[in-house]
């Protein structure tokens, strides 16, 4: 498919088309052709996304406390949320993937799609400035932010799991980091949650906190 279709969907036309191509270029493709991948753009896009989403939350949800704003941002600036943006604009049709990723349907992997959204955010910023990047971010995430604010007072999964496990007395709950992978700017952590030394569930995330939360969520799902 033509990149013009993606530009039309995201509402931004690039002056430098090569910049958009680089934002969609996965490392597997770049390594095969000795080109620069989208990893550095992804790194920059992650910071821009966090800053501009923080600014939007600060300006539009003045009644939220600092901790609540942090929780809303964490809910929105995550792989799941960015994956939805990528799906909305059919990013999978435009990704440049190497042969190995093509064979394993890498264009459908949430992590690859979410990373490409961050890279495109950085590309929009470089090509058109902060205002254009902000326009794209808010247009695509304002509904998710609104939804997150409605649930900001809800208990998190770790708290709910702790209360459930301690209904009949004290127990020892531990979250153990059993693995980590990826470069420093894009780590992936794996965490086990145990109760009294017994394994309950495993979780993954881009931070230890996110991985712990996912492990607690999985444990609750297993109980249910």
Image (spheres, rainbow, N blue to C red):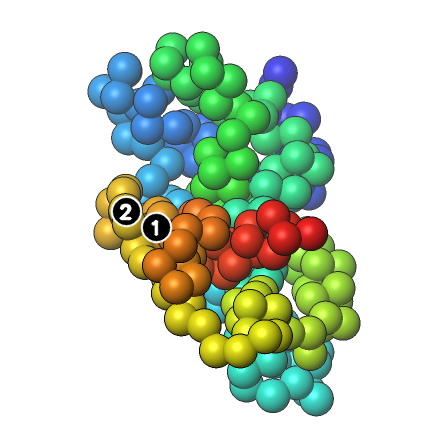
Q: Is residue 62 left or right of residue 158?
A: right
Q: Residue 168, position in %: x, y?
A: 59, 75
Q: Residue at point 40% right, 54% down?
A: 198
Q: Secondary structure at mark 2?
A: strand
Q: What's the residue at 55%, 68% (across, down)?
A: 165
Q: Which residue is mark 1?
A: 189
In-front residue for pair 192/127: 192
How many other residues sit within 10 Å of disc 2, few (<14), some (14-19) or many (≥20)? few
Q: Which mark is residue 179?
A: 2
Q: Secondary structure at mark 1?
A: strand
Q: Is residue 68 visible?
A: yes
Residue displayed at 53% across by 78% down: 169
What quarter of the picture does the N terminus occupy? top right
Q: Residue furthest front?
A: 168
Is there CB contact under 8 Å for labels 1 and 2? yes
Residue 19 drawn at (x, y percent) = 43, 35
In-front residue for pair 193/11: 193
Image coords of residue 54 (percent x, y):
55, 72
In the visual, does 146 lie left or right of 69? right
Q: Is residue 177 left or right of residue 63?
A: left
Q: Does 37 sit above or below residue 204? A: above
* Circle 1 residues within 10 Å: few <14, some 14–19, many ≥20: many
């Amino acid at each position: 498919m033509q990149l013009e279709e993606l530009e039309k969907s995201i509402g931004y036309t690039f002056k430098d088309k090569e910049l958009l191509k680089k934002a969609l270029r996965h490392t597997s493709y770049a390594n095969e052709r000795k080109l620069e991948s989208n990893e550095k753009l992804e790194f920059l896009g992650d910071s821009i996304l966090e800053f501009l989403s923080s600014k939007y939350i600060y300006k539009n949800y003045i009644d939220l406390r600092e901790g609540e704003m942090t929780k809303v941002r964490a809910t929105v600036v995550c792989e799941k949320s960015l994956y939805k943006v990528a799906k909305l604009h059919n990013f999978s049709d435009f990704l440049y993937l190497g042969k190995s990723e093509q064979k394993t349907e890498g264009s459908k992997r949430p992590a690859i799609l979410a990373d490409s959204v961050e890279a495109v955010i950085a590309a929009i910023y470089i090509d058109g400035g902060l205002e254009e990047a902000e326009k794209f971010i808010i247009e695509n995430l304002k509904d998710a932010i609104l939804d997150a604010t409605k649930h900001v007072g809800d208990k998190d999964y770790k708290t709910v799991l702790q209360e459930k496990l301690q209904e009949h007395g004290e127990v020892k709950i531990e979250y153990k980091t059993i693995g980590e992978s990826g470069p420093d700017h894009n780590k992936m952590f794996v965490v086990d949650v145990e109760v009294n030394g017994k394994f309950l569930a495993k979780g993954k995330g881009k931070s230890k906190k996110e991985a712990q939360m996912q492990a607690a969520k999985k444990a609750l799902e297993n109980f249910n």
